C-alpha cells in the first residue's frame, strides 16, 4: 500500500528509519562530499507516497505553507488541540518545533509528518506517531490534524492508513494507540474505519483548549491490522 522512500531531508538530519547507528555514519559520509540540491517540491522528499497524498518530515522551507494553513484553519482546529502558545505561528516557534521533531525522529522517539496533496502539492494537514516505546511494548501514539478546506475528501483516511502500515511494517511496532474527545465523532469514525477498537474512557486525559477533557481511548495491534480484509482499509470521505 505504501511506497517508502529513504531520504535525508534538506537542512535537518533525519535518519532513515531502521538503520543502525554504524550504518547511518557509513551512508552519511559520502553526503558530506557533495552539496545537497535544494528541495522545493515536497513530493521529491516523501517518506510515504500514496495515491492522493504524500507525507514528509517538516522542513524549514515548509514554514510558509504550514503557517498559512494553520492560520486559515485556526478556528476549526483550536477546539480539538492544546491551547496555542503566543508564538504558535512564528518562524522562531516553527524552527524550535521542527528541530525537536528532528531530534525525536533520529532518536526513534517520535515521527512527525506533513501531509501534502499528491496532485499539486498543497499542504492539507499533519500526523504524528509519538511516545514510541520499545522493549516489551513496541507501541506508539497517533495524532493528526486536517485543514478546514480539506475535510470530507478522504485524504486523512488515506494518510492514516499509510502511517499505520509504516508503523507496523517499517518501524516494527506491535501496537498503536489514539484518543479522541468524547464529542469528536468524526475522529472516532476515522479510527473505526482504520480498524481501531474503542478500549475505554479516560477522565481528564488531556488538556485541550485550556480545559482538561475526558477522552475515548483506542488501540490497534499489528495482528488486528493484518487480519483485516482488504476492503476494510479503503479510504472513505470525512474527517476532522
Image: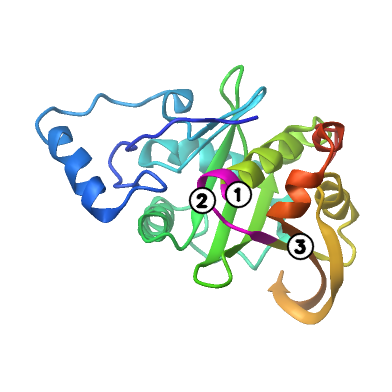
Percent across and percent down for residue 193 are 85, 44
Q: How many marks?
A: 3
In this view of the protein, can residue 240 be seen by the observer? no
| Horizontal relation, residue 39 to residue 128: left or right | left
Real-space CA distance between mark 3 and mark 1, rounded to the nearest whole angstrom: 13 Å
First to last magenta residue range: 167-176
Asked if disc 2 and disc 1 are in contact, CB closer than 8 Å, the reply is yes
Residue 111 x/y as whole percent: 50, 53
Quadrant where the N terminus lies?
A: top right
Label 3 vs label 1, nearer the camera: 1
Give the residue displayed 51% in from the left and 35% down from the top: 65
Considering the numbered disc 3 on the image, is that residue within a helix, a strand or a loop?
strand
- Residue 44 appears in which quarter of the rendering? top left
Q: Which residue is mark 3?
A: 219
Name the element at disc 2: loop
Q: For residue 119, which numbered disc appears in the image?
A: none
Label located before the other in sequence (2 or 3): 2
Q: Is residue 43 left or right of residue 166?
A: left
Task: Residue under label 2, please give it.
Answer: 171
Residue 196, image quadrant: bottom right
Point out residue 87 in the picture as x, y percentages from the top left corner: 48, 61
Residue position marked by numbered label 1 in the rendering:
168
Q: Looking at this view, name the residue that lies furthest to the bottom.
A: 203
Amino acid at each position: 500500500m505504501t511506497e517508502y522512500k529513504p531520504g535525508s531531508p534538506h537542512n535537518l538530519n533525519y535518519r532513515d528509519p531502521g538503520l543502525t547507528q554504524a550504518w547511518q555514519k557509513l551512508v552519511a559520509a559520502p553526503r558530506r562530499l557533495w552539496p545537497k540540491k535544494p528541495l522545493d517540491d515536497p513530493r521529491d522528499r516523501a517518506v510515504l507516497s500514496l495515491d492522493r497524498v504524500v507525507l514528509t518530515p517538516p522542513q524549514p522551507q515548509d514554514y510558509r505553507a504550514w503557517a498559512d494553513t494553520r492560520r486559515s484553519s485556526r478556528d476549526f482546529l483550536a477546539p480539538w488541540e492544546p491551547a496555542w502558545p503566543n508564538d504558535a505561528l512564528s518562524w522562531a516557534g516553527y524552527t524550535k518545533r521542527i528541530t525537536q521533531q528532528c531530534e525525536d525522529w533520529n532518536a526513534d522517539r517520535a515521527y512527525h509528518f506533513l501531509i501534502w496533496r499528491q496532485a499539486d502539492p498543497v499542504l492539507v494537514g499533519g500526523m504524528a506517531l509519538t511516545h514510541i516505546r520499545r522493549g516489551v511494548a513496541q507501541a506508539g501514539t497517533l495524532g493528526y490534524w486536517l485543514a478546514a478546506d480539506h475535510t470530507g475528501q478522504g485524504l486523512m483516511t488515506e494518510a492514516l492508513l499509510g502511517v499505520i502500515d509504516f508503523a507496523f511494517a517499517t518501524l516494527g511496532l506491535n501496537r498503536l494507540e489514539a484518543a479522541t474527545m468524547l464529542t469528536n465523532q468524526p475522529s472516532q469514525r476515522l479510527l473505526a474505519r482504520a480498524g481501531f477498537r474503542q478500549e475505554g474512557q479516560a477522565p481528564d486525559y488531556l488538556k485541550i483548549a485550556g480545559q482538561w477533557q475526558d477522552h475515548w481511548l483506542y488501540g490497534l495491534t499489528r495482528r488486528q491490522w493484518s487480519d483485516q480484509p482488504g476492503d476494510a482499509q479503503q479510504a472513505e470521505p470525512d474527517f476532522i
